[in-house]
Amino acid sequence: MSSHSAFAEAADALAVSVLGALSGTGGAAQLARYVDDAPDTLAALAAVRVLGADVFSPHLLAGHPFQAQDAAVVAKAFDAFPASEATEEAAVAHRDHATAVLLARLSGDDTLRAVAPAPADDPALSRTADWSGWSVRMAQLAPLATLGLDGPVHEAARAGALPLSRGVSRSILRRDFPTALRLVRWLAWLSHEGAGLPLDPDLAAEHVWLVGGAGPRAALDLAIARHFLAPQPGAAAEEAAST
């Protein structure tokens, strides 16, 4: 098996573990145990890097505790696969920095931000006139559509509800369902923030899931989107009190 295939399989396996923890069907996601039990340690560490900020989803969205040994695994993954400094890989730099920010925050060790410094200004984030290319870039940045992060990518999303919606429609028409779900995830995050949207992310998510299905990583995107679209605690009471 090639290293690429081994890394892809490991990323899918980790996505299944994170998804189970997030949905409450698989217990807590334990990165240290995942890596210890993996037949290929390097592939398991690569999987941690591939999923990036999404490995923190059970802690950010479902309130699971984050263990010191899990923080050590993420740091070790950065040691094995250092953050890219290539300017042509801006999307990778954004994802790496988001992972480092959340790692530092959840571990309480702010020095860990240094494993992936903030990327330089990314002018592509503001090019919403080219909505098809821009939405592809935002799909690549979908792991940043989570709690605990804010920055230039999130500002771009707030300013780009219409291009994101167009990107969802285009991806569905092209039967590119993984990309559609990544963009729906951004719309769901915007909905959670209270933004008005030209496309209903709940309906779009259900449509994509029904007609396209998905692999483990796309299923994780869908689960995170559904978290943002779920009624928030106290929302029903507030609505009743206002009527």
Image: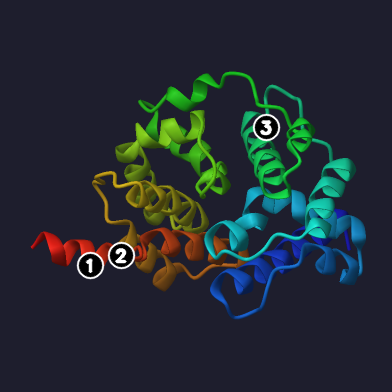
Q: Which residue is mark 2?
A: 234
Instruction: State the residue in front, 57 or 235.
Output: 235
Image x and y of residue 19, in percent = 60, 69
Q: Give, as a three-letter code, the residue at label 1.
A: Ala
Find the distance from the CA under tag 2 to the CA under tag 1. 5 Å
- Asked whether disc 2 touches disc 1, contact meaning CB atoms under 8 Å apart, the reply is yes
Q: In the shown orientation, is residue 141 left or right of residue 204?
A: right
- CA separation, marks 1 and 3? 42 Å
Q: Amino acid at mark 3?
A: Ala
Q: Secondary structure at mark 3?
A: helix
Count of numbered marks: 3
Report the residue marked by disc 3: 93
* Element carrying mark 2: loop
The percent coordinates of residue 175 (x first, y second) are: 44, 58
Q: Identify the amino acid type marked 2.
A: Gly
Q: Sequence-wise, which precedes: disc 1 or disc 3? A: 3
Placement of 82 over or under 148, stated as above or below? above
| Residue displayed at 66% across by 43% down | 105
Marks 3 and 2, how far apart at CA: 37 Å
Specify the quadrant of the image occupied by residue 102: top right
Q: Residues within 10 Å of mark 2 (few under 14, many from 20)?
A: few
Q: Write down the quadrant of residue 167 in the picture.
A: top left
Q: Residues within 10 Å of mark 3 (few under 14, many from 20)?
A: many
Secondary structure, mark 1, is helix
What residue is pinned by disc 1? 237
Q: Residue at x 29, y 44 (%)?
A: 195
Residue closer to the observer: 128 or 111: 111
Residue located 37% across and 54% down the image: 173
- In depth, the one of 174 and 6 nearer the eye is 6
Res 32 quadrant in image:
bottom right
Image quarter in which the N terminus is found: bottom right
